[in-house]
Image (spheres, rainbow, N blue to C red):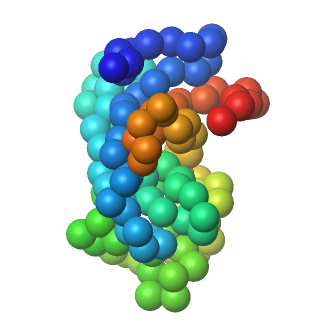
Amino acid sequence: MTDASEILLPGVGILATVDLSSIENEGQGIVFEYENRLGKKSKGFAMRWKSGFVAFQNRCPHWSLPLGIDGDFLNSSGAFIFCPTHGATFSPEDGECISGPCVGDTLQKFELKKTEKEGIFDVLFVKSGLTISK
Ligand code: FES
Protein backbone atom coordinates (compact mmCIF):
# COMPACT_ATOMS: atom_id res chain seq x y z
CA MET A 1 0.00 0.00 0.00
CA THR A 2 1.29 3.41 -0.93
CA ASP A 3 1.39 6.20 1.63
CA ALA A 4 -1.01 8.94 0.48
CA SER A 5 1.57 11.61 1.23
CA GLU A 6 4.31 9.96 -0.81
CA ILE A 7 6.07 12.37 -3.13
CA LEU A 8 7.08 10.76 -6.39
CA LEU A 9 8.76 13.70 -8.08
CA PRO A 10 8.89 17.38 -7.24
CA GLY A 11 5.37 18.58 -8.06
CA VAL A 12 3.78 15.10 -8.06
CA GLY A 13 2.03 13.47 -5.11
CA ILE A 14 -0.44 10.67 -4.48
CA LEU A 15 -3.62 12.13 -3.01
CA ALA A 16 -5.64 8.93 -2.64
CA THR A 17 -6.07 5.41 -3.94
CA VAL A 18 -9.49 4.62 -5.39
CA ASP A 19 -11.32 1.45 -6.38
CA LEU A 20 -13.10 2.04 -9.69
CA SER A 21 -13.65 -1.63 -10.49
CA SER A 22 -17.44 -1.39 -10.07
CA ILE A 23 -17.90 1.80 -12.12
CA GLU A 24 -19.41 0.73 -15.44
CA ASN A 25 -21.39 3.64 -16.87
CA GLU A 26 -20.04 6.86 -18.32
CA GLY A 27 -20.49 9.69 -15.84
CA GLN A 28 -20.80 7.33 -12.88
CA GLY A 29 -18.11 7.74 -10.25
CA ILE A 30 -17.03 7.91 -6.65
CA VAL A 31 -16.09 10.68 -4.25
CA PHE A 32 -12.82 10.37 -2.36
CA GLU A 33 -11.20 12.38 0.42
CA TYR A 34 -7.66 13.69 0.44
CA GLU A 35 -5.54 16.15 2.35
CA ASN A 36 -4.63 19.23 0.35
CA ARG A 37 -1.26 20.96 0.44
CA LEU A 38 -2.38 23.09 3.39
CA GLY A 39 -3.27 19.95 5.37
CA LYS A 40 -7.00 20.56 5.00
CA LYS A 41 -9.42 17.72 4.17
CA SER A 42 -10.79 18.06 0.65
CA LYS A 43 -12.87 15.91 -1.66
CA GLY A 44 -12.40 14.82 -5.22
CA PHE A 45 -14.27 12.56 -7.57
CA ALA A 46 -13.27 10.03 -10.17
CA MET A 47 -15.71 9.00 -12.90
CA ARG A 48 -15.83 6.88 -16.00
CA TRP A 49 -15.37 8.91 -19.17
CA LYS A 50 -15.13 7.37 -22.61
CA SER A 51 -12.84 4.35 -22.44
CA GLY A 52 -11.16 5.40 -19.19
CA PHE A 53 -11.56 7.50 -16.07
CA VAL A 54 -11.02 11.13 -15.13
CA ALA A 55 -10.64 12.77 -11.71
CA PHE A 56 -11.21 16.30 -10.43
CA GLN A 57 -11.52 18.22 -7.20
CA ASN A 58 -15.18 17.94 -6.13
CA ARG A 59 -15.67 21.65 -5.70
CA CYS A 60 -17.54 24.01 -7.98
CA PRO A 61 -15.50 27.19 -8.56
CA HIS A 62 -18.65 29.29 -8.08
CA TRP A 63 -19.66 28.64 -4.46
CA SER A 64 -17.32 25.75 -3.64
CA LEU A 65 -20.18 23.23 -3.56
CA PRO A 66 -19.98 19.57 -4.64
CA LEU A 67 -20.70 18.41 -8.18
CA GLY A 68 -23.04 15.76 -9.54
CA ILE A 69 -25.87 13.95 -7.78
CA ASP A 70 -25.57 10.56 -6.07
CA GLY A 71 -22.41 9.54 -7.91
CA ASP A 72 -23.64 10.65 -11.33
CA PHE A 73 -21.51 13.54 -12.53
CA LEU A 74 -22.79 14.16 -16.08
CA ASN A 75 -25.71 16.39 -17.01
CA SER A 76 -28.78 15.13 -18.88
CA SER A 77 -27.04 15.45 -22.25
CA GLY A 78 -24.27 13.16 -21.00
CA ALA A 79 -21.67 15.56 -22.36
CA PHE A 80 -20.68 17.69 -19.37
CA ILE A 81 -19.93 17.45 -15.67
CA PHE A 82 -22.53 19.54 -13.88
CA CYS A 83 -23.10 21.46 -10.70
CA PRO A 84 -26.60 20.79 -9.32
CA THR A 85 -26.76 24.07 -7.41
CA HIS A 86 -26.76 26.69 -10.18
CA GLY A 87 -26.28 24.50 -13.23
CA ALA A 88 -22.68 25.22 -14.26
CA THR A 89 -21.30 22.70 -16.76
CA PHE A 90 -17.69 21.62 -17.19
CA SER A 91 -15.70 19.76 -19.82
CA PRO A 92 -14.89 16.20 -18.69
CA GLU A 93 -11.66 16.49 -20.68
CA ASP A 94 -10.01 19.36 -18.83
CA GLY A 95 -12.56 20.70 -16.32
CA GLU A 96 -13.10 24.01 -18.10
CA CYS A 97 -16.40 25.66 -17.19
CA ILE A 98 -18.49 25.73 -20.39
CA SER A 99 -21.63 27.45 -19.10
CA GLY A 100 -23.05 28.95 -15.92
CA PRO A 101 -21.82 31.49 -13.39
CA CYS A 102 -18.18 30.39 -13.38
CA VAL A 103 -17.32 30.52 -17.09
CA GLY A 104 -13.59 31.14 -17.33
CA ASP A 105 -12.82 29.01 -14.26
CA THR A 106 -11.62 25.42 -14.35
CA LEU A 107 -11.99 22.43 -12.04
CA GLN A 108 -8.69 21.22 -10.58
CA LYS A 109 -7.91 18.09 -12.57
CA PHE A 110 -6.03 15.11 -11.13
CA GLU A 111 -4.24 12.31 -12.94
CA LEU A 112 -5.14 8.67 -12.45
CA LYS A 113 -2.42 6.05 -12.56
CA LYS A 114 -3.20 2.33 -12.71
CA THR A 115 -1.84 0.24 -9.88
CA GLU A 116 -0.95 -3.42 -10.11
CA LYS A 117 -4.46 -4.33 -8.92
CA GLU A 118 -7.27 -4.43 -11.49
CA GLY A 119 -9.56 -1.38 -11.20
CA ILE A 120 -7.47 0.31 -8.49
CA PHE A 121 -5.94 3.69 -9.30
CA ASP A 122 -3.71 6.17 -7.54
CA VAL A 123 -5.01 9.74 -7.77
CA LEU A 124 -2.10 12.04 -8.47
CA PHE A 125 -1.72 15.75 -8.09
CA VAL A 126 0.59 16.86 -10.86
CA LYS A 127 1.86 20.42 -10.85
CA SER A 128 0.81 22.35 -13.93
CA GLY A 129 3.24 21.88 -16.82
CA LEU A 130 4.55 18.48 -15.67
CA THR A 131 3.57 15.27 -17.42
CA ILE A 132 3.76 11.72 -16.12
CA SER A 133 3.74 8.39 -17.89
CA LYS A 134 0.71 6.21 -17.07
S1 FES B 1 -22.22 26.50 -6.83
FE1 FES B 1 -21.90 25.53 -8.75
S2 FES B 1 -22.79 26.88 -10.19
FE2 FES B 1 -23.08 27.85 -8.27
User: x, y (%) of residue 90?
Assistant: 55, 67
Q: Is residue 114 visible?
A: yes
| Image quadrant occupied by the N terminus | top left
Q: Residue at x 41, y 28 (%)?
A: 15
| Image quadrant occupied by the C terminus | top right
Foreground residue among 91 and 29: 29
Q: Is residue 67 visible?
A: no
Work out which residue is located at the far bottom of the displayed protein and give it. 77
Total marks shown come to: 0
Q: Is residue 19 left or right of residue 118?
A: left
Q: Image quarter for residue 96? A: bottom right
Q: Is residue 35 above or below residue 5?
A: below
User: x, y (%) of residue 105?
Assistant: 59, 55
User: x, y (%) of residue 118?
Assistant: 43, 44
Q: Is residue 5 left or right of residue 33?
A: right
Q: Is residue 65 left or right of residue 121?
A: left
Q: Is residue 77 above or below residue 49?
A: below
Q: Residue at x 44, y 87 (%)?
A: 76
User: x, y (%) of residue 29?
Assistant: 37, 61
Q: Is residue 105 above or below residue 42?
A: below
Q: Image quarter for residue 24? A: bottom left
Q: Residue at x 51, y 12 (%)?
A: 7
